Image (cartoon, rainbow, N blue to C red):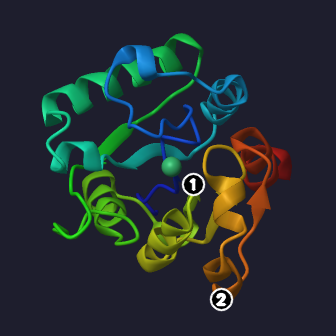
């Protein structure tokens, strides 16, 4: 009997909520994508553990405290729950570029930590993000599929020259399309 769970790893900004050029630092900065809330409600009754893995370099840059970052994240998780969704755990990497301790995507530290904490089967897991670094982090962790969504920074990221040099990865219009194709629409 296997006691390992598959995970749906999700980037937060640009996937669940809108990106902000000057970082999400206040509750007023949080704007949910309605399709993402609907998608998270779809995943609720699947075996997938839903794990948010988010870089929050505003902490490392001294623009926001880790406590504020965690409080904002908890409120986001609560709204998802109120809308019949489920986020089982969240990991926040506070590092600014150049401060890397191993958690900042494209490094896989948050995914590996989550796999350890929640008994995840990475080879059966999925990563969805709006940046190439999300795809790279998922691959570095050994997930089954790492996909890009075109919300948030996704469209600009998909057009970057580096996108062509990466092994092809699936691209979806948004989180709902990704989840429908990769998880809930399969049966
Ligand atoms: Mg993002």
Where in the figure is residue 113, as x and y percent of width and height?
Answer: 26, 60
Query: In this figure, which residue is indicated by the disc labeled 2?
Result: 165
Where in the figure is residue 79, as x and y percent of width and height?
Answer: 48, 15
Camera-nearest residue between 107 and 159:
159
Where in the figure is residue 35, as x and y percent of width and height?
Answer: 73, 28
Which residue is located at x 54 percent, y 31 percent? 17
Relative to residue 144, is residue 94 depicted above or below?
A: above
Which residue is located at x 27 percent, y 50 percent? 57
- The image's mark for residue 83 is none
Relative to residue 29, is residue 129 depicted above or below?
A: below
Residue 10 visible from this viewpoint: no
Instruction: Looking at this view, name the residue that lies furthest to the top.
Output: 82
Query: In this figure, which residue is indicated by the disc labeled 1?
Result: 129
177 relative position to 9: left or right: right
Relative to residue 102, is residue 131 depicted above or below?
A: above
Where in the figure is residue 2, as x and y percent of width and height?
Answer: 45, 63
**SS state under label 2:** helix
Nearest to viewer (mark 1 / mark 2)? 2
The answer to whether the beta carbon of the residue marked 1 is less than 8 Å from any atom of ligand 1 is yes
CB within 8 Å, label 1 to label 2: no
Camera-nearest residue between 133 and 44:
133
Camera-nearest residue between 15 and 28:
28
Res 180 quadrant in image: top right
Mark 1 to mark 2 CA distance (whole Å): 18 Å
Which residue is located at x 51 percent, y 76 percent? 139
Camera-nearest residue between 18 and 181:
18
Which residue is located at x 60 percent, y 31 percent? 44
Q: Earlier in the sequence, mark 1 or mark 2?
A: 1
How packed mark 1 is, by other alpha carbons closer than 10 Å (few <14, some 14-19, many 20 or more), is: many
**SS state under label 1:** strand
38 relative position to 112: left or right: right
């Amino acid at each position: 009997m296997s006691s390992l769970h598959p995970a749906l790893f999700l980037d937060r900004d640009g996937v669940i909520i809108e990106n902000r050029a000057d970082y999400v630092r206040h509750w007023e900065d949080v704007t949910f994508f309605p399709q993402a809330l609907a998608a998270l409600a779809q995943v609720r009754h699947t075996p997938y553990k839903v794990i948010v893995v988010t870089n929050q370099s505003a902490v490392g840059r001294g623009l926001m405290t880790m406590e504020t970052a965690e409080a904002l994240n908890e409120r986001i998780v609560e709204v998802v729950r109120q809308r019949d969704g489920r986020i089982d755990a969240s990991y926040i990497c506070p590092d600014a570029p150049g401060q890397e301790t191993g958690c900042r995507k494209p490094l896989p530290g948050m995914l590996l930590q989550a796999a350890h904490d929640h008994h995840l089967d990475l080879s059966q897991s999925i990563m969805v993000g709006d940046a190439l670094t999300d795809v790279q982090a998922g691959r570095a962790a050994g997930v089954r599929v790492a996909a890009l969504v075109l919300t948030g920074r996704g469209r600009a990221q998909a057009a970057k020259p580096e996108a062509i040099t990466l092994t092809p990865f699936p691209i979806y219009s948004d989180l709902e399309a990704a989840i429908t194709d990769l998880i809930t629409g399969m049966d």
